[in-house]
Every structure is written in structure tokens, then in C-alpha cells.
Amino acid sequence: MRTRFVADVSRPVPFNVYTLSAPYRVVVDLPAVKVRLPGGGGRGLVEAYSHGATGEGRSRIVIRVSGPVLVERSVMERRRGRTAQLVLDLAETDPATFLDRQRAQMARGAAMWSASTVRAAPVAPSRQGSSKPVIVIDPGHGGFDSGAIAPDRTEEKGLVLAFARALAKRLAAKGRYRVLMTRESDHFVSLDGRRMFAMENHAQLFVSIHADLLPRRYASVRGTTVYTGSRKASDAVARLIAKSENQADILAGAEFHVDEKLRLVPAEMVATSKRVVPAWLDELVMRETKIRSREFAEVLLDHLKPATRLNANPHRFAAFRVLKIPIPAVLIELGYLSNAQDRRHLSSKGWRSKASRAVASAIDRYFNERLFRPPFLPAAVASTGR
Ligand SMILES: [Zn+2]
């Protein structure tokens, strides 16, 4: 089988095409240009696609394909009026040929790979002498990673950004915190980029915002859930959510390394060489952090309860990669896009206002009651991790 993929591009630009497996994808890295993707969804070998920013001046198209493919032809055709068309001819192939081609591709472009890796969000300019606690708000997904997509096409990335903005505004208005966001617009930030951002800015609290989708058998699961990090998941739903969140980077084609044999290695497999916390402190700090994260989660649920419908089991644990930091951290699933009532809440301004007020007052209480007893980390440790 063969499939032609055509996208309109605002001007002719250089580009880099490569393939990835597990799941099979074709990735096109481009400068920051406007791209109009074909309408009508998947067709032939193409299952789904998206485009979005990967950092300053860069963007990426990610095409999910049904199996191993070869990119037989890839051209940027000039059109009238200085626009262009990106044309990819994809052909079905077997896994062995796919791997062969991928290796050749890598030998050619190993240098380009690292250059196209998504950069971490920049460190916010530090304010010397400011003793305000730093709170990092982390709206999930962004750019070509739309996150969950509801049956009515509502995208998680937009909903969580709107909520994060409302929350940041409320917190900033109090004047007692320094409030930072891992992304303030619609662009992709890798999970490690989010963690590093919190570490480098010496955050004292990290709040990740999501609104995910569960498989149909969980369509009745609804309500706000607060997740904290744990090696062992509290239940099947928690495990499922963490698994899909942890895939964000891999699906994006962002987190991979080229090993000495020029093979693509998922970042997970080399993660030990990039430890965020030195080994000797790891256990101690992570235990302390876990306790504080859970304390904060309970305060949060106390405040959310009168403001919104909570999940039947509102505090769950799982191994979220983005929460693996030596900073008290929670991940709020505002609701589930797979549930119709939750969807209505999530896109309502009134609900957003009420729920963000509840989160902000929980943060006040957390700091007031000195459940947070700063500093529990030597400053030198908080900045280790480069
Ligand atoms: Zn999410």
C-alpha cells in the first residue's frame, strides 16, 4: 500500500524527515512556519497527524502510521504566491527494512538529531533577594502534542492552559508568591524540560494540570482527581493515566538518544545517566517530598470538595515521570474528557473560575500552615542535575 501525505506550508523551507518506531511515526522537523494539515483525518497508511512548535523558531509534524513505512519521496514544492507544499510518499514495508533504513538515516543525520531535540523551557530571570515562595504551574501537553481529544474535538492542551492561566493570575494577585508557568502558550515542552524548569527555578511547589481521556470502559469515571507520585500505582486507572502521560515525549519524537552504534534509544533507557537527584540523597529527599506532596494533595482536596465534583477515589498515586522531582508536586486531573458532564465543566468559564479559586486558596493554606517547612533541601542540591 502507498499513501501520499500533502501539507500546505506558508513558505518553502528546509526540512528533515525521519521515522520512529513503537509506535510507528514519520516526523518532519521544520522552521517555525504556518502549516495546514490535510483535512478529514487518517487515510491509507496514515492514522493521525499534528503540527506544532517545538521551541523558538522550530516546529514539527508528527504523523502516526499504521505500521513500518518507507518515505519513498519527500519534497517541498514551490507554489504560486510564495507558498509551498510538503509532499511525502509513504510505502508499506516490513519491520527489517524499516530498521535498516532507519539506521542509514541516522548515520547520515546523527548530528542533526541532537540539534532537533526539544529544548527545555528557559529559566525565568532570577530575582535576587526575593524570598517569595516559587510556585511552578505546569499545563500539560502543547504544540503538536494536543493531549487527549474529546469526541467533540475539544483538546486537552487548550483546556489545561486556560485553567493554568486563571490559576496563575489568581496566585500572582495575592502578591506573596512568585508564579511561573512551564509554558504560557501553545508549544511543546518535554517532560524533562518541565522538571528541569522547576528545579532550576527552585520551585517550592509544582502543580501539573491535565484533563485526560480514559478508554470507553471507564466512561463513567468522572470528577477531579489529585495524583501524587509513587513507584507503585494505587489502581488501574492511575496506572493507565501515568502510562499515557509518560509517553508524551516518546510520542512526540522528542526524547531519544543516539547510541554508539547509531541506534535510537528511548530516553527512559538512558535515564540513569541523567539523574535529577544525586543517588545518596535520592531516597531521603524523595521520601520527604512524597510526604509533603501527599499533605498538599489532602489540603487541595479539602478545598476542591465544595467547589467541584470530586472523583469517587480522589487521591490516587502512580509513577508520573513529570512528578519525579525533589519538590512537593501534584498532578491535577481536572476531569476526564471521556465523560460528558466533566467535558461541560471543563469548558465552562464559571467552573474554571470556581475551581481555580479553590486551588489557590489550598495553596495559601498549605503555605500558611507551614506544612511546607523551608528549606528542606540544601541550595546546592536543588540546582544539581545538569
Ligand atoms: Zn494529559
Image (tube, rainbow, N blue to C red):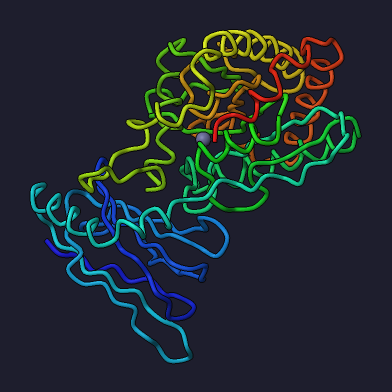
**Residue at far bottom of view:** 80
Residue 264 vs 373, above or below: the answer is below
| Image side of residue 80 versus residue 283, left or right | left
Instruction: Name the residue located 30 percent from the left edge and 46 percent from the top edge.
Output: 258
Q: Give the camera-side residue of 341 and 225.
A: 225
Q: Give the camera-side residue of 330 and 337.
A: 330
Point out residue 358 in the picture as x, y percentages from the top left corner: 78, 24
Instruction: Name the residue located 73 percent from the left edge and 36 percent from the top edge.
Output: 352
Point out residue 379 in the picture as x, y percentages from the top left corner: 71, 24
Residue 272 vs 169, above or below: the answer is above
Point out residue 383 in the picture as x, y percentages from the top left corner: 64, 30
Q: Which quadrant would the C terminus be assigned to in this image?
A: top right
Count how many numbered circles sit on residues in the image: 0
Q: Give the camera-side residue of 166 and 263.
A: 263
| Image side of residue 200 versus residue 319, left or right | right
Point out residue 26 in the picture as x, y percentages from the top left corner: 29, 56
Residue 97 vs 151, above or below: the answer is below
Instruction: Name the residue located 27 percent from the left edge and 45 percent from the top edge.
Output: 264
